[in-house]
Image (cartoon, helix red, strand yellow):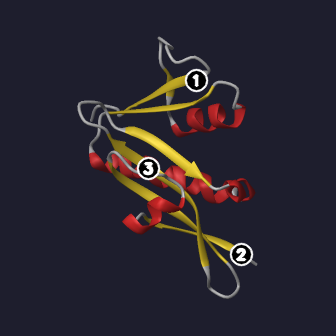
């Protein structure tokens, strides 16, 4: 029975799901491991650090990633822990406005929709770390 292993992303993981990378990232990789021990990268997600902007939360998935929602939720929780431990105060994310699952997931992870929405067909979300 295949299982999903979550681990820190290494540079070799990126080309499996992302064509070219413009920013530094800190991410988690989801690897689907079969009975023989062979692994396939089916997801990469975490933080991207564009210059002069707050960090962006992102997830890139292979089509079969939809078969492992629990593993991807665990990865999302790991990413949120990474954000809190890093001391980052604000993170931005987007999702398609018609993707109800993504909307529910971002809410569940603690993101709030922005007061102003300027990207047609998308919802812009913000995560603000609570002051200690």
Label number found at residue 9: none
Which is nearer the eye, 97 or 127? 97
Can residue 120 be spotted in the picture?
yes
Front label number (2 vs 1): 1
**Element type at mark 2:** loop
Q: Where does the image place residue 96, in percent across and percent down from the top left?
A: 62, 29
In this rendering, the answer to whether 31 lies above or below 119 is: below
**Element type at mark 3:** strand
Q: Where does the image place residue 92, in percent across and percent down from the top left?
A: 42, 31
Horizontally, residue 34 falls left or right of residue 94, namely right
- The residue to which callout 3 is attached is 46
Disc 3 packing (10 Å; few <14; some 14–19; many ≥20): many
In this rendering, the answer to whether 89 lies above or below 43 is: above
**Picture quadrant of residue 105:** top right
- The residue to which callout 1 is attached is 122
Disc 1 packing (10 Å; few <14; some 14–19; many ≥20): some
Give the distance between the C-alpha atoms of the residues marked 3 and 1, in whole angstroms.
Answer: 19 Å
For image coordinates 61% across by 55% down, the residue present is 72
- The residue to which callout 2 is attached is 2
Q: Earlier in the sequence, mark 3 or mark 1?
A: 3
């Amino acid at each position: 029975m295949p299982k999903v292993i979550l681990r820190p992303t290494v540079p070799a993981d990126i080309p499996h799901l992302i064509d070219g990378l413009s920013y530094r990232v800190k991410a988690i990789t989801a690897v689907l491991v079969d009975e023989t021990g062979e692994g396939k990268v089916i997801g990469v997600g975490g933080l991207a650090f564009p210059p002069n902007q707050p960090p962006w939360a992102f997830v890139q998935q292979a089509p079969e990633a939809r078969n492992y929602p629990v593993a991807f939720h665990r990865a999302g929780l790991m990413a949120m822990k990474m954000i809190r431990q890093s001391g980052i105060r604000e993170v931005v994310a987007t999702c398609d406005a018609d993707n109800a699952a993504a909307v529910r997931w971002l809410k569940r992870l603690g993101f709030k929709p922005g007061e102003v929405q300027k990207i047609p067909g998308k919802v812009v979300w913000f995560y603000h770390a609570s002051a200690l």
